[in-house]
Amino acid sequence: MSGTMADEAGLAARLAFLSRPEVYPEPQSAITVLETRLSWVFLGDDRVYKLKKPVRDADVDFTTVEARRRNCECEVRLNRRLAEDVYFEPLALHHRPGAGLSFQPGGAVVDWLVPMRRLPETAILDARLLAGSVTDADIDRLARRLVRFYGEQAEPVPLAPGQYRQRFEQALAASSEGLR
């Protein structure tokens, strides 16, 4: 079997494994799988697990297990700044010959996931907006938090207008290429 076919078979096995609710450290009663451009998201009862796709494009390179581990760690570190109680430490997925996939330590680490606390659907901003339950006080509270957060960040690196335009054009070209 070629390396690519073996990789695809391994990925298919990981996706099938992660679709089973009983395999997680906190077993779930059901798992719903969503797919984004860069990840698969496994929604359980009270947990969410995000698996990065082994892809490479102009913005990311997740083609190695190590790159996916680093990205998971970075995602948790960055997102905890505004959602500390939502993001948990990255979780290694192991493979043991003869025993298969497991979250239990032992065997080779074959991938990494970002575990999160699942928020109630009614608490998600787009659902609240559709329901008309966002108040002026909610918006003010969010705005104050974001102003405080961004005010605490390092000063941005100055960027000349020509440099900005060049980066913008590169991003547009990469997006156009991805859409083709």
Image (cartoon, rainbow, N blue to C red):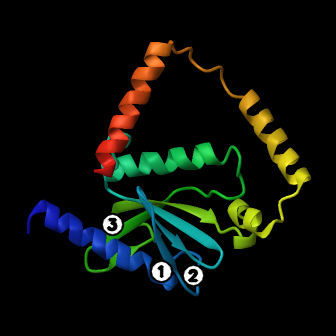
Residue at image coords 54%, 48%? 75
The residue closer to the viewer here, 157 or 179, is 179
Amino acid type at image mark 3: Gly
Q: Residue lying furthest bottom in this view?
A: 29
Image disc number at residue 23: 1
Mark 3 or mark 1: which comes first in sequence? Answer: 1
Q: Where residue 82 appears, x then y in whole percent? A: 71, 46
Give the CA separation, mark 3 to mark 2. 21 Å
Q: Does the rendering let one see residue 139?
A: yes
Q: Which mark is residue 27?
A: 2
- Name the kind of residue labelled 2 in the image: Pro
Q: Are marks 2 and 1 in contact (CB under 8 Å)?
A: yes
Residue at 42% of width from left, 25% of height from top?
167
Which residue lies at the image location 36% right of the left edge and 46% below the top edge?
67
| Amino acid type for the residue under numbered disc 1 | Val
Q: Name the residue under label 3.
A: 107
